[in-house]
Amino acid sequence: MTAITYRSADVDGVKIFYRQAGNPEKPALLLLHGFPSASHMFRDLIPLLADRFHIVAPDLPGFGQSDMPDRKTFAYTFDHLAHVIGRFTEVIGLKTFAIYVFDYGAPTGFRIAMDHPERITGIISQNGNAYEEGLSEGWNPIRAYWKEPSQKNRDALRAFLAPETTRWQYTHGVTDETHVSPDGIALDNFYLARPGADEVQLDLFGDYKSNIALYPNFQNYFRTYKPPFLAIWGKNDPFFLPPGAEAFKRDIPNAVVRFLDTGHFAVETHAAEIAAAIREVFAR
């Protein structure tokens, strides 16, 4: 049995909850979740990798069991999320580590990698985008808010926070919905329903444009440092398209790109395949 512990760290006054497993003497792997989830999305993956890695999976500020500071005192931007998680790795004593990035975890993790390239031993991107061609038309309502940040356009994005939308994100593109556990969907909707969580998420929707502005910087980091890289993608993702995965090879020719016949939350249905690919690529 894999022993997983559940801890919290004080990061400059913000409580960051995290899951930890594996021998701290093994290579470290930092798992960074996406919207609207938390570290619980890795509940099936962690036991499959804990013999090979020292695994740490935090909840981002405003997500899961981590603190959700008031928006008046805490800026919900991706720059700020990356700063807090970067500090988190220092607080818990991670000196070097690989990162597994998914969805929001990608712009968070890529910022950390750019700021501290000497600390990054490799990258696994599971539907974590860094190229314009990876963005689908599903982003159009959010793009409209970037172009005109009116209250009307902000309120239009509340549909992304509805319980039925969360379920759709988990099941769209999945070949057999009976393989999708209801647990993650229920937890995500519970967290989204907390007072103030809607405004936090709308702030992050608005700030996502900063990630696209940084795509050239991310790509320059890839070209310059060429970290060991695995892009493993649910090919039926309605938000991040397969060309976004293939594009990593432009900047990291030795990157390994794999596609899975599933949707956005690929780890829900294909944890075993993802774990096997990580073991294969990082055994090299």
Image (cartoon, helix red, strand yellow):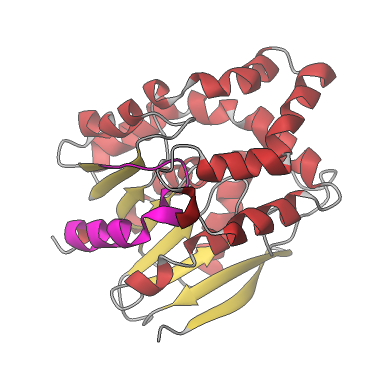
Question: Taking the image as drawn, is residue 267 in sight?
Answer: yes
Which residue sits at x=20%, y=42%?
Answer: 255
Residue positioned 41% across, 48% down in the render: 266
Q: Is residue 76 visible?
A: no
Location of residue 138 with respect to 93 vertically, above or below:
above
Compared across the picture, whether 222 is left or right of 66 comes to left
Residue at point 60%, 52% (across, down): 37
Residue at horizontal 36 percent and vertical 69 percent from the top: 28
Is 271 above or below relative to 35? below
Where residue 245 sits, quadrant-wise, is top left
Q: Nearer the viewer, residue 232 or 176?
A: 176
Residue 172 appears at what percent x and percent y? Answer: 50, 38
**Image quarter of the C terminus:** bottom left
Residue stretch rendered in magenta on the structure = 259-281
In the rendered image, residue 274, in percent from the top left (x then y), is placed at 31, 56
Q: Nearer the viewer, residue 44 or 199?
A: 44
Q: Taken as a whole, is the magenta stretch helix, strand or loop?
A: helix
Location of residue 210 in the rendering, given as x and y in whole percent from the top left corner: 57, 28
